[in-house]
Structure formats: structure tokens, C-alpha cells
Image (tube, coloured by chain):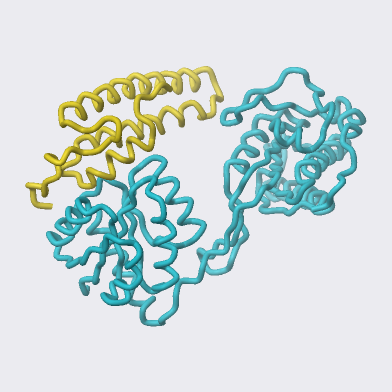
Amino acid sequence: MLIPRLLVFDPDDYTARVLQDMLASSGFVAPIVLDDAVLCAEVDRHRPDIVVVNFHFGRAGLLDTVARLRRAAPGCAVLALAAPGAALRDLQDWSARTGSIDAIVEKPVSGERIDAALRALAAGRPARRADGQARAPVQARFAELAVLVTELRRPLGVLPQLQPAEFFERVEALNAEHARQVRAADGSVLRLGGGGLVATFAGPARAHLALRCALRLLGAHAVSAADLELAVGLCSGLAVTGFLHSGGAGQYEVAGAAVELAARLSRAAPAGCALADRDTLISAGATQPHVRQQPVRVPGVESAVVCLDPAAAPHAALGALAEPEHRP
Amino acid sequence: MKTLFDEHALARIIDQSLVYQCACPAQVSRAVLELRDLHRYQLNCANESTNDRLVHETIAQAALDAHARLETCLTQVLELEGWDLDTMTMPDTLKKRPAKPW
């Protein structure tokens, strides 16, 4: 394997030279750039395969510099060094949004780890250089969403009475009906599975639509003859949405704490009920949703969540929700 | 969790140390950050039984104890090495090329 051409970008002279020495001991020759104003020009001059960027937490302008570098030299890989903790999390978030960094090594770095990272990056470089194309940018963005998760439960004794195919047929039928109701409520079904579905609601009325949908799902389920139990979790918050291309075909995906917490709430909800975090209830404009007086504590949800039981008081719970003023 | 060092200070120590061979304070800083992650994780972990809760509380308390001990250790190490504790700046005397081969 050819030894990749490197360039070190580090605004701190001392750490830059320590890094240069370390790379030299592994057989890499790496000129140093200390000044971000000349980085792109130096990259143009040296034509490195990989730029090693030493991030110093809190130092302004480094991210902008790397973003400029990616635009100016899209065929050049970027390996970032970052301290663990907030520095690493910030960098990972930014990298996920912008796609400007190809690999991150946590500090303190060892010769072995940086050597392995460089060689792994170098192994992936020729194909990119050969076709002369920059990597297709990941299509992802932040979005405020309300997430609805259903949980289908089989009461004790139901499963042994069913043939496997029968059980899956019932799950499929329930999922299909729930998906229809979600779409009718202007929601988007993200995925369906043996345990229920995950749906998202966007726009200014997202919390209201999600809550109303949850109550309608539960209300309809309560009067149906379904022998599987239904519980629902609702949570609102910032999430990353976009298309994942691993495996070829693009798949729409939503990730974030709200998705995980909605799933936790669905698991914690009693059968026939919905659990919603407080923000969702407030955003939904639900004035008197407290069918159960005792809030429920769910790990990971800071404020106590409120349990809605439409079977106990369907008109009160649904009637508290006005029609949304804004459509998403 | 009470802390003596915020994340910015710990990152600054690690940033200046950079490499394993000359990074004893950075190693301690990294361990402090990992203990904070461990503590946070235990607080948010699902308790589906009384035993689950006891397990998580036990780990969280141990993480708290170890965190306090390591933060004190870090303070002592930084003082011994002569760091500027206001700016978390490494003293020039420590700014030398590593003696060991990589």
C-alpha cells in the first residue's frame, strides 16, 4: 500500500510539532500548517491525501476552516483529533450534519491508533480519487417532530393459542389499521414491526395531531375485538431526519432522543393507555388530559409524564383537544 | 454530580497533552469524563425491577465516589506539574518532545 501524503493543520505550534514527530516515527512525512488563512492554499500546493486536523475545544473558526477545506478539496480526506466529552460530541454532531470529517480519533492519541486510522483512510482514498468525485453529501437535517410509538402486547395465554402465521396476520392487520389512521391524521409511518409502529408528525400542530391520533388509535382499539393489547408513547423534540444509504437503497430514518423516549413511554404505558411527555401535552394544547391523577416516572424523561386513558373518559380526553389552527 | 472541572477545562488539558506518552493529566481527565458518562448512563437506565434499581444505584454511587477521588487527584497532579489552574495552561517546562518512541 502506498504511504499517503499528509498535511497537519494545528493552530498550536507545540502540539503541531509533537504530532509531526509522532507521524514521522510511523513513516509519514507531514508538513504543518498553523494558520487557517493559508490552509486551502497549502492543501492546493502539497496535494495531500489526508489532512490531520487537531481540534482545540472552544477555539473559534476551526469548524469553518474545515468546512472550507472540504469544499475546496473534496477528494482530500480529513482526520480529526478531538478530546473526549463535549468536544467530541460537538464535533461528531457537526460532522454528521456537514459530512466534512471522514474519521475522528479521540485524544490522547497513541501512535498505533492514529497509524491505524490513517491507513484505513488511505485504503479508502484511491477509489475516490480515481473517479474524481466528491462523496455524495448525506441528506439529513434537524427537525422538530412529535414521535408516536405503538406497542402491541400479547396477553398471557394468547400466543400459545395461535399458529405462528395467525399471530403475524393479526399483527399485520393491526399495524395496517394503525398506519392508516396515522396517515389520516397527517402523520408519517416510519417503520412497522412485530411490536407495533413508529410514526412522526411534523409542522406547527405536530404535538396536537400526534396526541389526537394516539387517542383515536386507543379508542378504536378498545372497541375492537383485537386480542392483542395496545399502548402508545408520545414524545416531542429535535431529531435528525434523512436518508440512510447503507445497503444501497435509501431508507428514510429518524434518530434522536425523542424517538427513544417515545419507545420507552410506550413500554411503560398501561395497556389501553398513552403516555406523553409534558412538552407534548402543552404543545398539543390539551387543557385537561389528566385522566390519571398520578404522573408516571419514566427513565430518561425529566418531567413526569401524564397517562391518558381514553377508555376511562373518552369524551373528556378527546374533547379537551381543539381542532388545530395550523396544518403541517 | 459536583464537579471541580468543567468539560471545557478537561478538554483544554487533553488538547495540550495530545499524546499518550506525555499525557498523564490527560489520562486522568479522560477517566473523569468517562465516569461522568457512566454516572449519567446509570441515572437514565431503565429500572424494570427492584434489583435493577439497586444495581444502577450501586454503580452510580461508585462512579460518584471514583469521580470525586479522581478530580482531587487531577488537582494535585496539575499543582505538582505547575499548570496554571486559572487558564489550564501547561507549563513550558513540560513542553518537550516525548522521550519514548511511538
Residue at x-position 57% and y-position 31%? A300
Residue A11: x %, y % from top left? 29, 55
Question: Does residue A241 lie above or below A206 as drawn?
Answer: below
Question: Does residue B29 lie above or below B3 as drawn?
Answer: below
Taking the image as shown, residue A169 lies to the left or right of residue A265, namely right
Provide the letter of the chain coloured yellow.
B
**Between residues A93 and A155, which one lies in front from this camera angle?**
A93
Provide the letter of the chain coloured cyan.
A
**Between residues B74 and A328, which one lies in front from this camera angle?**
B74
The answer to whether residue A175 of the structure is visible from this angle is yes
**Between residues A51 and A161, which one lies in front from this camera angle?**
A51
Residue B31: x %, y % from top left? 30, 33
Q: Examine the image and state in which quarter residue A226 appears.
A: top right
Residue A207: x %, y % from top left? 76, 42
Q: Examine the image and state in which quarter residue A258 appears.
A: top right
Taking the image as shown, residue A136 lies to the left or right of residue A155, namely left
